[in-house]
Amino acid sequence: MTETLTRGSYIYEMSSKHQPAIRVKSGSEVIVETYDCFLNQITSDSATYSSIDWNQINPATGPIFVEEAEPGDILAVHISKIELADQGVMVTGPDLGVMGKRVSNFAIKMVPIEDNHAIFNETIHIPLNPMIGVIGVAPKEGDVACGTPGDHGGNMDTTLIAENATVYFPVFHKGALFSLGDLHAAMGDGEVGVSGIEIPAKVTVTLSVIKGESLRTPLVENEEGIAFIVSKETLDEAADSAVEEMVDYLLERTEMSIEEIAMLLSAAGQVQVSQIVDPLKTARCYVPKSILTSLQIGKVF
Ligand code: CA
Ligand code: ZN
C-alpha cells in the first residue's frame, strides 16, 4: 500500500528533534506532496519583496521515520515519479545569486507549464527537467535549515536528483527522518540567479534501508552514472572532496592503485557544479556506468 504524506506536514530545518509525520517500513512507497520553496506565497508577478514572509521559505515535507534505519546504515531513496503543478515561479534581486551585486531590482516571474515546457516568455520555452532541490535526512548534529546543504543532503539543488534516480544518504539517527521539498520544473547547474523554476509537486519515492555499507555524503545514481555530492564553504573544497569520495569508493571496490584511479577519473570522470548560491556550495564527481561495468561494479551498494 502506498502512503501519501500531505504537504501540511512540513519542517524548516532538518533535525533529530522533530516528531515523525509518518512511520514506514523499509521498501515502502510514499507519495510526498510539497509546497514550492516560498510556501506557495507568490501567486502573481505583482508580489513584492516585502509582501513575502522570508521566514517561511524552503519548507520540506516530512519527516518520514523508516523503521529499520539505524545510525551507520544507508537510506536509499528511489524517485519513481515527479508530478508538477501547472505554474512555477522564479525570483532574483539585490544580494541574491551570482549577479546580486549588479541586479538593482527584486524581480518575480510566474512561469506557466505547458506541453512539457516552462514558458519563460513568448519565445523562450524551456524543456522541463523536474528535480528535487531539498532532500535529506536528520543531520548528525543540531538543526540545519532546509535552505542549507550538507552531508545529510538538504538544499543540494542538484539537477541529477530527478525521476528514475536513486539518492543514497548516510543515516545519522534512528528512523533516518527523511524529508523533501523545493521542487524545480527546471534548473541550470549553478542556479546562478538564486532560484530554479520553483513549483509545488507530488513526488513518489521508495525508501529502503541498506545495512552493512556506509557513506559520508550523499550519492546519486541514475541510468547513466553515479555521482558523489559534497557541500562546503567554497566550490573548490566541495569539488576536491567529491573527487576524494569517488576515489575512496573505487579504492574499496577494485584492485586499482590510487595512481590508476587518479588517471581514470582524469580521463573519464566529470567534476560538475550543482549550485553556487546557497549558504554552502555544492559540487559532485560523476562516473559513467560504462566505467563501473568495466570495473565489475554491478550494484552501487
Ligand atoms: Ca533550493
Ligand atoms: Zn528551489
Image: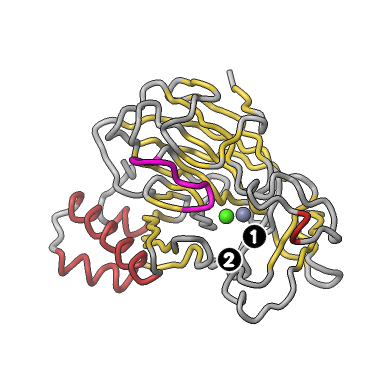
Residue placed under numbered mark 1 in the picture: 196
Identify the residue at the far top of this view: 1
Give amino acid for label 1. Gly
Residue placed under numbered mark 2 in the picture: 191
Secondary structure at numbered mark 1: loop
Quarter of the picture containing the N terminus is top right
Establish if 112 lies above or below 72.
below
Secondary structure at numbered mark 2: loop
Asked if marks 1 and 2 touch (Cβ < 8 Å), the reply is yes
Give left or right: position of 133 versus 264: right
Please state the extent of the stretch shown in magenta in the rendering.
Answer: 139-148
Which residue: 49% across, 63% down?
Answer: 274
Q: Position of residue 18 (x, y in %)?
A: 48, 29
The colour scheme is: secondary structure
Give amino acid for label 2. Glu
Q: Quadrant of residue 103?
A: bottom right
| Ligand 2 visible in quadrant | bottom right
User: Which disc number belongs to residue 131?
Assistant: none
- Kindly report the distance in space between the C-alpha atoms of the residues bearing marks 1 and 2: 6 Å
Q: Earlier in the sequence, mark 1 or mark 2?
A: 2
Give left or right: position of 176 versus 52: left
Which residue: 43% across, 49% down?
Answer: 221
Residue 281 in magenta? no
- For label 2, the crowd category at 10 Å Cα-Cα, with few meaning under 14, some 14 to 19 and many 20 or more, is many
Asked whether mark 2 lies closer than 8 Å to ligand 1, one says: yes
Give left or right: position of 185 versus 167: right
